[in-house]
Image (tube, coloured by chain):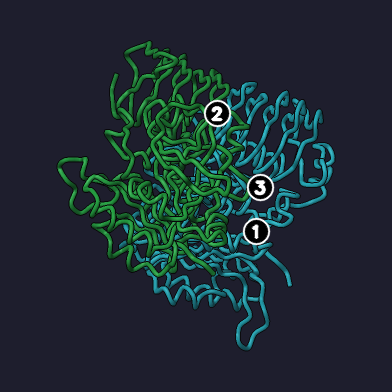
Chain colours: A cyan, B green
Amino acid sequence: MKPNNMIAMILAGGRGSRLYDLTNKLAKPAVSYGGKYRIIDFPLSNCANSNINIVGVLTQYESIFLNSYVTMDSRWGLDAADSGIYVLPPREKAGEDLNVYRGTADAITQNIDFVDSMNPDYVLILSGDHIYKMNYEKMLREHIASYADASIAVIDVPKHEAGRFGIMNADVTGRILEFEEKPKHPKSTLASMGIYIFNWKLLRKMLLADSKLKDSSHDFGKDLIPQMLRDNRILHAFKFKGYWKDVGTIDSLWEANMDLLDPQTELNLNDEGWKIYTEDTNVLPQYLGPDADIKRAYITQGCEINGRVTGSVLFTGAIVKKGAQVIDSVLMPGVVVEEDATVTRALVADGVRIGEGCIVGKAGSEHITLVASDQVLSAAAREKETEKEKDTTKERTVKK
Amino acid sequence: MTTAFGIITATDRVSRVEGLEDYRPVGAFSFIGRYRVIDFMLSNMSNSGIDQIKIFTGSNPLPITEHVGSGRQYNINSKRGHLHVLFSKHAYAYNLYNTGITCYKDNIDVIENMPQEYVVLAPSYMVYTADYAELLQTHVDSGADITMLYQPVDTAREEFLTNFTVTLDKDRRVTNFELNNGAAKARNIFMDTYILKKSLFLVLIERALKTSSLYSFANIVADNVENLNIRGVSHRGYLASINDFQDYYEANMRLIDFDTADDLFRKGWPIYTKTNDSPPTRYLDTAIVKNSIVSNGCIIEGSIENSIIGRNCRIERGARIKNCIILGDTRIGRNTQIENHVVDKHVQICNIKKIVGDADFPGYVRRGDRI
């Protein structure tokens, strides 16, 4: 296939610590979502559907599973002769110690040799843990048409939420004049999605300069973009409309799953023209028994249901036995709900078995109950922990 | 180590499935929504370590070629393994001459060139799971010329009427090999699965050609029951032979039952198929689904009972489906009632509100129909 001289680099090193046990042994981009997918399937499928043939995946935190998952590039159709997914974890280099990725920009700096070997005109920087469908080729066309040095994808967010994001202030032509990270008094509602297109020659130069700065956090949002604005570079805001979610917490992961129950959801996964590809599992179709009662549910192959399921998303191989009830919950791959058990407003992690007659979760609870592999973490206990911990999921920097 | 290559074929089959077979050979029939019939034989071979497989398709190779592709989904090594779809180069206008034997003869060089000592022949119109590696070992240990797989049934009066049956002596040697005449209840139904040396296979093909232009491989084996040491190995578990429309319907419907499904789908014996990358199925507020098998990619607003729904189907509000097999990409419109039917792919039923067939003789809606 004819390439469009742009390669993608997906930042997939984040831990997602507010996902608790879900990310104990798994990087956040590998977390299951939407019945049969993993979060990273979204940017990878977007790349494949946008005619981007070369994708580098920068991994760091608990990368064993993620590395082996993305290496199977045939899953996303990226296995043609001129295509490929390349796993890029931190590595030891001649004359240097093993360096971890110190920030999002540093992760690219440490792989300049890789990008050079592909000789692209443009580099697309993506995050591995966002759920959305976007045509990056369209973004590239706009980038070229506006003679930009860099383009940033932005999404309109509600005014009261704008303070949580990096906010772009742009003129009518889309040229970005100002960038404010989590502003107290936002001047606009255009939030950065952490998706960038750079002209590689310029980015390369800027990365090398940034890597020498002692007080830089080597982060695209915090360092590179402000530097480009100071240099009076042309930064273009690419306006994205549609579904976009960065799932940082158990509640938001649950919510993102619940979004799929809505027939009017903006995230249309039935679109034949923009399929989301994923691992092919050799499981049976859905088996719905004589006592099944299913309403408002999103269910995938390999599930076996003979109980009541309402307002829930069931992942590959989930089993709900006779007399069991699953209400407003997410059952991750391989979860078994034994006879007469009840699961309400909960997110049950991979492979957990809810014993016969057990009751998990509570209707109307403020937070979603997380049922992880070996323990039931009640919503109340988690609330306490949340207060203690600060979010480190986005644009995480690791100190040596 | 003894090695075998596989041949999957249906060219000796004498019966026909009304309707569905107008569009594709039985091997390419949709099966319980997610699969095609041929997936089971291909998975049996792959799981048995056979990665050189020839599929003989008869006169219409397209639907099979389209589905199996390079064979990658069947877990066949992409360098050492090989999946090969073959068809008769001289399809005769008079179908009677298009036997399995003529198809083998047309591709005889392909068979001759196979490096493996043994060949496993399996049918593309049957559904069962069996370990051919075990069967091959039994064959070699027994010193037999041919080993045949069979299943004892007690329904031979009503079912398997165009299948062959085997009679065995107490040493499990086949003494009689003939078509099921429906005269007895209990018969050993031959599962159209043979293991033999490639050299003997080639000899029998030549002998069949000399004997009669209409001979099938089964005919020539039957002629040689006394000269050759032919042994039977009994199989247990789910078995379906899709000889006619009724067989197809029942083979599918039987698998709605969890326990029957356990008899076919065994642990450590995955059944591979081509992925369609369909999203999960969305059930809406008004959905009622009982005792059914549903594939991915569907949107279900109506009621489904005792039925099988293929990929990417839309069952609209108020629609009632009972005892049906609905193949992929079909839309059943609002308040439509369908009972006892097989509905082929890409069908839209919107204007007729009631299509009810006989429970004993289910009806059929053709592919692509707009009703």
- Residue B292 location, x and y as percent? 54, 26
Left or right of residue A101, residue B154 in this image: left
Label 2: chain letter: B
Viewer-side residue, A295 vs A320 = A320
Reading the image, the residue beneath label 1 is: A14
Mark 1 → mark 2, Cα distance in angstroms = 43 Å
State which tag comes first along the sequence, 3 or 1: 1
Determine whether the residue tagged by mark 1 lies in a helix, strand or loop: loop
Left or right of residue B90, residue B64 in this image: right
Viewer-side residue, A266 vs B360 = B360
Reading the image, the residue beneath label 3 is: A248
Mark 3 → mark 1, Cα distance in angstroms = 10 Å
Viewer-side residue, B241 vs A196 = B241
Reading the image, the residue beneath label 2 is: B256
Q: Residues within 10 Å of mark 2 (few under 14, many from 20)?
A: many
Amino acid residing under circle 2: Ile
Left or right of residue B238, residue A271 in this image: left
Point out the image quarter for the N terminus of chain A. bottom left
